[in-house]
Amino acid sequence: MLVVKIGGAAGNNMDTVCEDIAALIKQGQKVILVHGGSDETNAVSEKLGHPPKFVTSPSGFSSRYTDRETLEIFAMVTSGKINTLLVERLQKLGVNAFGLSGVDGRLLEAKRKEAVRAVENGRVRMLHDDHTGTIQTVNAALLQTLMDAGLTPVVAPLAISPEGVALNVDADRAAAMIAGALKAESLVILTNVPGLMRHFPDESTLMPNIERAKLGEALKFAEGRMKKKVLGASEAIDQGVQRVIFADSRVHFPVSSALSGKGTVIA
Amino acid sequence: MLVVKIGGAAGNNMDTVCEDIAALIKQGQKVILVHGGSDETNAVSEKLGHPPKFVTSPSGFSSRYTDRETLEIFAMVTSGKINTLLVERLQKLGVNAFGLSGVDGRLLEAKRKEAVRAVENGRVRMLHDDHTGTIQTVNAALLQTLMDAGLTPVVAPLAISPEGVALNVDADRAAAMIAGALKAESLVILTNVPGLMRHFPDESTLMPNIERAKLGEALKFAEGRMKKKVLGASEAIDQGVQRVIFADSRVHFPVSSALSGKGTVIA
């Protein structure tokens, strides 16, 4: 079992990723694909007159503020567009792909963030209508049912709260939780850089291997979105995934290349 | 087995429909929900700066022209937004709903319209990049697999061509084809009018019963979107569905009310 996460950021090449995945599936590999969609959500939000809003926590972290309208736009873009186009692309390549989001059949159950602390004009405010969550459980049986039917699941990063509220979740951590729940052999997290670099963006400082025990230390080299990928990697390994690979989506055969050890391998 | 089609047009009340469906499911009824989304697609298309385009055929019929960009917007709105929100609403009511579109696992395979004949400035033009299809086959085994797993399918009106191209399909006819493939007992098509009227919009001329043999004749009373509903009804009955009911979505318990015989019953 292999879980592949592909980002939505500019520069990721969906075509080569899908071709590579299709070839692996034809060789008998079982694959689950998980995708993101933040950048396109931002673009569509702007066009729809509801520009994305980012808030800064008192400790200095920036995160998306997901009000109800933003959640609905996020669902449109990730589950409606990116997911459908990935499924279509894989179907064209002969893979019986099947798109779903974490809301469907309660695939991903998440705890909703009660409140977000945001610093505005030097004062801390609590924002209560955020629609973001942290995944608590993965319905592995549902994914197994789909795979037993010969389908390749393609998962959009939405989850549902125990009360039945749809939530935006981080796609890297969703992929990590899914890989963990299914005891996947490998989790490949594709991105538009070659892996984790000691001095980003100097690619000559790529870290080819990191032991699980040293991941906490490695976190300090992670810039921006790479932080959540490192966090996801820890979660996946702790749940029994044998190795997590951060790899470049822009090369030919990005998944096979990652599986052969290119990128940053965490084990 | 019951198939319910709910429209996306203004005036349809999703809350009462979902509450009624949840109550029926708790009583042991198996349900598949199919939905549309044309009106909201038009609104989002306008906002995104790609206004909907309707073409008129030489015989005077008007239909949506779905270029690639429109198809992607249609997928965003129907599969991403309307579908996700219906699944969320049902999950809140305790139903283990599961959203999918006809692209997923090739649920709905359709023949793409080769070309659309459009009259423009008095001349007939052929438009070749339309992304609309006519459903040929329904993957009933896939729906059965989902239902055997205790899930309630909620279907968005997209299909896939044999070549793997995503297509926009008519939701009423999708519901009819699904009901036919599953040999459903009843197909309830909810709309924002009480049923088929002899003199639309005079509700006192509602036709309470129509025999299958007289459906062709009834077609001449059908205005606008009702035409495709009548066409869908014929297809469903011909495939073994026992009865098709056109009913009002705006009442309390719209589905139970239709099943008790309110609306236009075709058998």
Image (spheres, coloured by chain):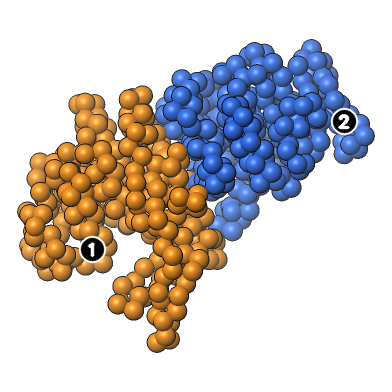
Chain colours: A blue, B orange
Amino acid type of disc 1? Answer: Lys
The residue under the point 20% across, 58% down is B230
Q: Quadrant of the N terminus of chain A?
A: top right
Residue A175 shows in this picture: no
Q: Quadrant of residue A255?
A: top right
**CA–CA distance between discs 2 and 1?**
63 Å
- Residue ranking furthest to the bottom: B122
Residue closer to the observer: B221 or A127? B221
| Residue A119 screen position, x and y as percent | 69, 37
User: Disc 2: which chain?
Assistant: A
Circle 1 Cα neighbour tier, 10 Å, few/some/many (<14 / 14–19 / ≥20): some
**Above or below, A122 relative to A45:** above
Q: Which residue is mark 2?
A: A206
Residue closer to the observer: A41 or A16? A16
- Residue ranking furthest to the front: A27
Q: Which mark is residue B227?
A: 1
Residue B221 shows in this picture: yes
In the image: residue A18, left or right of residue B242: right
Amino acid type of disc 2? Answer: Leu
| Residue B238 screen position, x and y as percent | 18, 50
| Residue B243 screen position, x and y as percent | 14, 45
In the image: residue B70, left or right of residue B15: right
Secondary structure of the residue carrying tag 1 is: helix
Q: Quadrant of residue A204?
A: top right
The residue under the point 75% across, 30% down is A258
The residue under the point 44% across, 65% down is B114
Residue closer to the observer: B222 or B104? B104
